[in-house]
Image: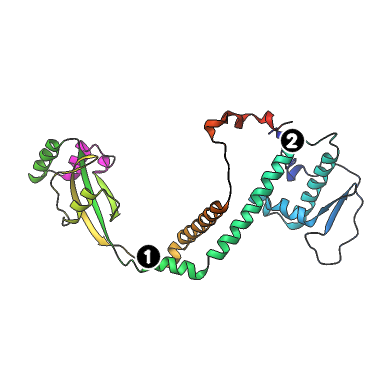
Amino acid sequence: MPQFRSILLGTLAASALCVTMVTPLAAQDDGVSAQTVVADVNGTEITMGHLILTRAKLPPQYQELPDPVLYTALLDQLVQQELLAQSLEGEAPGFVALALENEERNMIAADVMEQVVGDALTVAAIEARYEQDYASAGATPEYNASHILVETEEEALALAAEIEAGADFGALAKEHSTGPSGPNGGNLGWFGEGMMVKPFEDAVKTLEPGAVSGPIQTQFGWHLVQLNDSRDSQIPPLDDVRNQITDQIRNEAVAARIAELRESAVITRVEPDKIDASALSDYSLVDE
């Protein structure tokens, strides 16, 4: 979209550069509402609601300016925009109607999403999810292990013999392991059940801290595994996982509502193999 067709035609810093003849409106003694008229431009009213929505789109650094400063700057901006809009000769460009349709669709959808999330995101729902995913699960074992990954069983057996003879596991991992943890002495850090492929995890569970397994084959190659330590996981307090739980409930609620709407909707789509998708980059199609 051309630069001069941006919805916000000027910055707050430049908002006072346009000089026009202004007649003050009568003072508003009653309570202010979204319908309160704050300016009239050749018979077209600008309301407090217009200012509120314009302010909501400002970058954070402008949001912090004092209200009187913002009020004056935003009112100047909307008056200038209205003057320019009224000066248009002929029909409005085609992209204007399309942009308004997109904006309306987006705003209505966002409002519906907030309603859906508001209904789902209750204190009881958050506490129930915490109980389900964390509290009731109890402590689970976690392991800290290192490994050496090589391509063949023969290589693994040779390295196992060196370890048996007293060679340092970490040093051999740095020298021979083909896995990404090799430069770190093969250390994989802490992990819980289900985070490693089954043959690897099964081997780890049989080891005592400090012990090294025999060669283990997985789809990645052959491993020698050393268990460094083990512990029981700690159940996190609700406040530590509240944001995570909130995001899960929010996403699930919206996804469920969309799925429900899809089931009762009649939707036809043109897939990309049936249309020239490169048209997405052709702005001239809407600039008419």
The quadrant where residue 173 appears = top left
Most common SS among magenta residues: helix
Q: Is residue 242 left or right of residue 173?
A: right
Of callouts 1 and 2, the N-terminal one = 2
Q: Which mark is residue 67?
A: none
Residue at the left extreme, as displayed: 165
Residue beneath label 1, please? 134
Q: Is residue 284 left or right of residue 269?
A: right
Q: Which mark is residue 94?
A: 2
- x 24%, y 36%: residue: 178
Q: Give residue 159's position: percent from left, percent from top.
A: 13, 40
Amino acid bearing label 1: Tyr
What is the distance, in whole Å, between disc 1 and disc 2 at their CAs? Answer: 54 Å
Asked if residue 117 is among those painted magenta in the image, a careful observer would answer no
Are there few (<14), some (14-19), or many (20+) residues within 10 Å of tag 2? few
For the record, the magenta segment spans 168-185
- x 80%, y 63%: residue: 32
- x 87%, y 42%: residue: 19
Return the residue nearer the eye: 173 or 141.
141
Q: Give residue 24's position: percent from left, percent from top.
A: 90, 54
Q: Give residue 257's position: percent from left, percent from top.
A: 54, 57
**Label 1 secondary element:** helix
Q: Is residue 28 above or below residue 222?
A: below
